[in-house]
Image (cartoon, coloured by chain):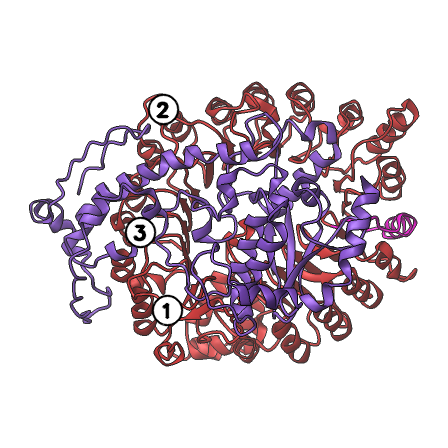
């Protein structure tokens, strides 16, 4: 039985009890693991020997110093249609001036890989390193915990980002991990509306900061739900929604599936402006449907009850009303 | 003499069987011999299906042709925390349609975490003449129109309980659809509804139903209407208030206090949204008879909570916010010696700093002072191995222990060590522990403890814990009675899963999200274990567009006799035998 590592919570030093080379350590733990060798545990069945993956397996764990590697164990689906987010980019390029941190202007490396609301702190395992060699398991305690520790400092950084984004000076709520702490939506929504009722306290207190709204998309077979509080600006929201609904937009957009958001092609932009693309709209407190992006972010999250991704052609009529309405509210 | 068992007339056996109520026992009876199987299945009236995909409506109906009560559960537990995307499944409609045809005398339907449409509610309303009980727990997909159909048609309805469901509240009119001649209501729970219901209709309904025992109002029912409602139902045993606030007026207060005092049978209180503390004393006269108190939405401070709780000497169950603080829990421990269940919820879970003086000490106090404490759910920000040890030794009679230390991977705050030993003490001393939720900094060692001592453990929830597959292996190989295992963000992968594949058939389900299980392993598992449904969820695209060694986002494995399900949305893939053909 391998003795567990001593964990230095602060993450500054790490006492590696197990050397990085597989051969010397396999003797100690190899015995235990023989029992859990890759078999199916079915009587009389033998699972085929797995071919070890070439080369990359062990050392990558130990060398995971680059935080980006730590997060990106999820290869982003190439060719995901860019059109939708490009539309948002084009429209909201200047809305970001409402005080979002310039770092967040680009799709944040911290937020992008995993989709809506997910945050750093996932077990940072590069897919290439999940080897099925028997010896590997020995290294995973060391490497996994090291990798986890390396993600830790990043997690501590996170709270800064939403803080700089919001106007409140109080150290705002930390960046939220989906589904943690484990509190039921009913409770979250109830407590969140507790706070909006006591509006004078809402500024200083991050409170339950959770706001789930349904998102429907014209033509999609089912709804999704997003927590508006996990985004700090329109860009984050749009990129999350795009990921969520990308499987439905396949075939709709002509853009040449560029991997990064920065590359907005001329032709796709033209297509968007001609209304053949999707537009994001929302239903506000009064039951009116408005175009997303016309009002400051905080005002939007306060009044948004539901989101709908509408076909651009249908949404054209919305724009003037939305602008007028927000003018009259100011 | 060998034929003795068979020579009992069926009616006699049936009569004997009617005294056997528990599902497990009935299942055992049915295994004795073929004729007992036959007799049992014809006289079975009540069925519990823990996973609606483990069996199909035709299979259920074929085996049990004369059911009166059906309970179904749909989505995995982690759906409560938004880990299961919308559209995943758990649709009630196929079940309700099938049962409408097969069980005209069905009386009770209880659904949990399922998607229920208005259409389904209409079918229920029109198909079952003797329909009595509808419980929709954490369900969604229906509106108040569906409720109107139930109200209008179910003449014999006794119980309508919508606990924590997500109802699209179109209007409060539906309540008026209960006909004036309808008087059989015994239990009504509408606490999840957003809009106001027709208050006059509610008052009339309440006062004409003499058997009404449970009434849980929604937040929109104003406090000044409560006395009337209470006076209309002095026999109430369980009450959930609406908003517990109003302009502070002495006449409103005394009216309320009088009304409460008139409810001599009232044993359970809940609701208490938007509490104005000055109104709390209105319930003091009945505190001494309360056995259950749910203040988990009451944002009042410790002194008010202490005053209330110290009067509830018979209290068995308390749900409260962490505003109660360690001091309040100490008072609880001193006053409520009959306490069986405590749940402390966080008032500010996303804040960076603690906002209340609630620590591990509060739980330690309660474990010391309340000898009957069995069930704990506790959110806090710090914990120590020493405290957990103390709790374990104080309360070896714990059966449910769920601890949530808010910051993931928090170590023992005194020693900075993992909390392995503390949780180890819990499983070691609490020999009847059936449910456990872990949190804090944990290594594989805690799982070794759990596998060694957690022999009665049925449900385990794990997050941000462990170092390697060994952790998962300990649990799967050691916990003999494990039924449900849910794991998120742990470095558990293929080895432990595949090595313990057979174990999965003895469990209801396994959930693993943000772990290190590869797509390849899921395929192997699915192909080798035909009686398991191995479902992979991935919102970024088909898993086979990535290397086989890529970890899957979410994995849900459950045993089933119904084969792979046919209602999966686009982001769920099944790893059965044909999957190789389907995904390419």
Q: Where is residue B334 in the image (x, y as percent from the top left)?
A: 57, 20
- The structure residue drawn at horizontal position 63% and vertical position 31%, both measured from the top left corner, is B315
Q: Are marks 2 and 3 in contact (CB under 8 Å)?
A: no
Q: Mark 2 against mark 3, which lies toward the viewer?
A: 3
- The structure residue drawn at horizontal position 59% and vertical position 21%, both measured from the top left corner, is B328
The residue most toward the front is: A266
Q: Where is residue A269 in the image (x, y as percent from the top left)?
A: 58, 63
Q: Mark 3 against mark 1, which lies toward the viewer?
A: 1
Q: Are marks 1 and 2 in contact (CB under 8 Å)?
A: no
Asked if residue B498 lies in the magenta stretch, the reply is no
Residue stretch rendered in magenta on the structure: B193-212
Left or right of B237, for residue B302: left
- The structure residue drawn at horizontal position 24% and vertical position 29%, both measured from the top left corner, is A13
Q: Mark 1 points at which residue?
A: B545
Q: Where is residue A260 in the image (x, y as percent from the top left)?
A: 44, 56
Chain ID for purple? A
User: For numbered disc 3, what is the local secondary structure?
Assistant: loop
Disc 3 residue crowd, few under 14, some 14–19, many 20+, Cα 10 Å: many
User: For numbered disc 2, what is the local secondary structure?
Assistant: helix
Q: Are marks 3 and 1 in contact (CB under 8 Å)?
A: no
Residue B517 appears anywhere in the view: yes
- Marking on residue B386: 2
User: For numbered disc 1, what is the local secondary structure?
Assistant: helix
The residue lying toward the viewer, choosing from B154 and A282, is A282
Residue B70 appears anywhere in the view: no
Chain letter belonging to callout 2: B
Q: Mark 3 points at which residue?
A: B492
């Amino acid at each position: 039985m391998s003795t567990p590592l001593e964990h230095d919570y602060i993450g500054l030093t790490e006492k590696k009890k197990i050397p990085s080379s597989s051969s010397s350590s396999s003797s100690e733990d190899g015995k235990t693991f023989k029992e859990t060798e890759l078999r199916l545990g079915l009587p009389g069945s033998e699972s085929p020997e797995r071919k070890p993956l070439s080369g990359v397996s062990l050392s990558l764990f130990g060398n995971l110093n680059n935080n980006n590697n730590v997060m990106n164990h999820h290869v982003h689906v190439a060719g995901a249609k860019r059109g939708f987010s490009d539309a948002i980019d084009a429209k909201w390029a200047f809305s970001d001036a409402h005080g979002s941190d310039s770092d967040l202007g680009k799709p944040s490396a911290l937020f992008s890989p995993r989709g809506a609301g997910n945050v750093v702190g996932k077990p940072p395992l590069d897919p290439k390193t999940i080897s099925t060699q028997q010896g590997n398991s020995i290294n995973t305690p060391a490497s996994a915990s090291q990798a986890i520790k390396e993600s830790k400092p990043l997690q501590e950084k996170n709270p800064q980002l939403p803080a700089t984004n919001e106007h409140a000076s109080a150290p705002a709520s930390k960046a939220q991990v989906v589904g943690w702490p484990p509190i039921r939506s009913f409770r979250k929504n109830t407590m969140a509306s507790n706070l909006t009722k006591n509006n004078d306290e809402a500024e200083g207190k991050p409170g339950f900061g959770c706001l789930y709204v349904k998102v429907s998309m014209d033509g999609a077979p089912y709804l999704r739900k997003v927590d508006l509080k996990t985004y700090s600006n329109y860009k984050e929201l749009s990129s999350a929604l795009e990921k969520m609904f990308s499987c439905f937009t396949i075939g709709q957009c002509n853009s040449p599936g560029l991997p990064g958001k920065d590359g907005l092609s001329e032709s796709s932009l033209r297509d968007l402006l001609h209304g053949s693309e999707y537009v994001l709209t929302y239903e506000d407190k009064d039951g009116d449907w408005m175009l997303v992006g016309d009002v400051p972010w905080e005002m939007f999250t306060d009044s948004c009850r539901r989101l709908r991704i509408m076909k651009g052609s249908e949404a054209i009529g919305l724009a003037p009303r939305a602008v007028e309405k927000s003018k009259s509210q100011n | 003499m060998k034929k003795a068992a068979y020579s009992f007339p069926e009616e006699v056996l049936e009569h004997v069987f009617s005294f056997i109520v528990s599902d497990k026992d009935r299942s055992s009876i049915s295994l004795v011999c073929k004729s007992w199987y036959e007799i049992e299945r014809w006289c079975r009236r009540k069925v519990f299906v823990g996973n609606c995909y483990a069996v199909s409506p035709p299979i259920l109906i074929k085996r049990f042709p004369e059911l009166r009560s059906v309970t179904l559960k749909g989505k995995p537990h982690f759906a409560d925390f938004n880990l299961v995307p919308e559209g995943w499944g758990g649709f009630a409609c196929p079940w309700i349609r099938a049962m409408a045809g097969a069980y005209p005398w069905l009386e009770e339907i209880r659904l949990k975490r399922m998607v229920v449409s208005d259409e389904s509610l209409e079918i229920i309303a029109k198909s079952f003449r003797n329909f009595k009980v509808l419980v929709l727990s954490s369900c969604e997909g229906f509106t108040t129109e569906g409720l109107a159909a139930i109200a209008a048609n179910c003449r014999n309805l006794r119980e309508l309980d919508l606990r924590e469901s997500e109802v699209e509240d179109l209007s409060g009119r539906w309540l008026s659809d209960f006909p004036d001649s309808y008087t059989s209501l015994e239990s009504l729970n509408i606490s999840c509804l957003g809009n106001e219901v027709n208050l006059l209709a509610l008052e009339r309904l309440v006062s004409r139903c003499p058997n009404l025992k449970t009434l849980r109002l929604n937040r929109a029912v104003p406090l000044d209407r409560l006395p009337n409602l209470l006076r209309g139902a002095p026999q109430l045993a369980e009450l959930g208030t609406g908003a517990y606030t109003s302009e502070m007026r002495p006449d409103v207060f005394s009216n309320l206090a009088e009304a409460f005092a008139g409810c001599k049978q009232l044993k359970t209180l809940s609701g208490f949204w938007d509490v104005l503390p000055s109104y709390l004393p209105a319930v003091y006269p009945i505190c001494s008879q309360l056995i259950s108190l749910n203040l988990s939405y009451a944002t009042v401070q410790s002194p008010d909570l202490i005053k209330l709780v110290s009067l509830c000497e018979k209290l068995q169950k308390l749900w409260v916010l962490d505003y109660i603080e360690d001091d309040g829990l100490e008072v609880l421990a001193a006053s409520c010696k009959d306490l069986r269940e405590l749940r402390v919820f966080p008032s500010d879970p996303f804040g960076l700093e603690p906002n209340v003086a609630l620590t591990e000490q509060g739980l330690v106090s309660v474990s010391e002072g309340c000898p009957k404490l069995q069930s704990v759910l506790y959110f806090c920000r710090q914990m120590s191995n020493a405290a957990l040890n103390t709790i374990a030794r104080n309360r070896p009679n714990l059966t449910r222990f769920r601890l949530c230390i808010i910051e993931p991977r928090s170590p023992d705050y005194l020693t900075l060590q993992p909390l392995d030993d503390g949780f180890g003490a819990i499983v070691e001393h609490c020999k009847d522990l059936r449910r456990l939720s872990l949190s804090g900094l944990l290594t594989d060692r805690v799982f070794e403890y759990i596998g060694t001592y957690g022999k009665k453990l049925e449900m385990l929830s794990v997050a941000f814990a462990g170092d390697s597959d060994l952790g998962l292996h300990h649990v799967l190989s050691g916990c003999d009675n494990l039924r449900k295992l849910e794991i998120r963000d742990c470095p558990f992968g293929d080895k432990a899963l595949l090595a313990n594949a057979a174990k999965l058939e003895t469990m209801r389900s396994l959930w693993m999200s943000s772990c290190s299980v590869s797509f390849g392993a899921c395929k192997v598992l699915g192909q080798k274990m035909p009686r398991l449904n191995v479902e992979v969820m991935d919102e970024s695209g088909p898993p086979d567009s990535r290397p086989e060694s890529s970890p899957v986002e979410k994995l849900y494995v459950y045993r089933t006799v119904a084969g792979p399900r046919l209602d999966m949305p686009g982001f769920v893939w099944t790893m059965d035998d044909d999957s190789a053909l389907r995904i390419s």
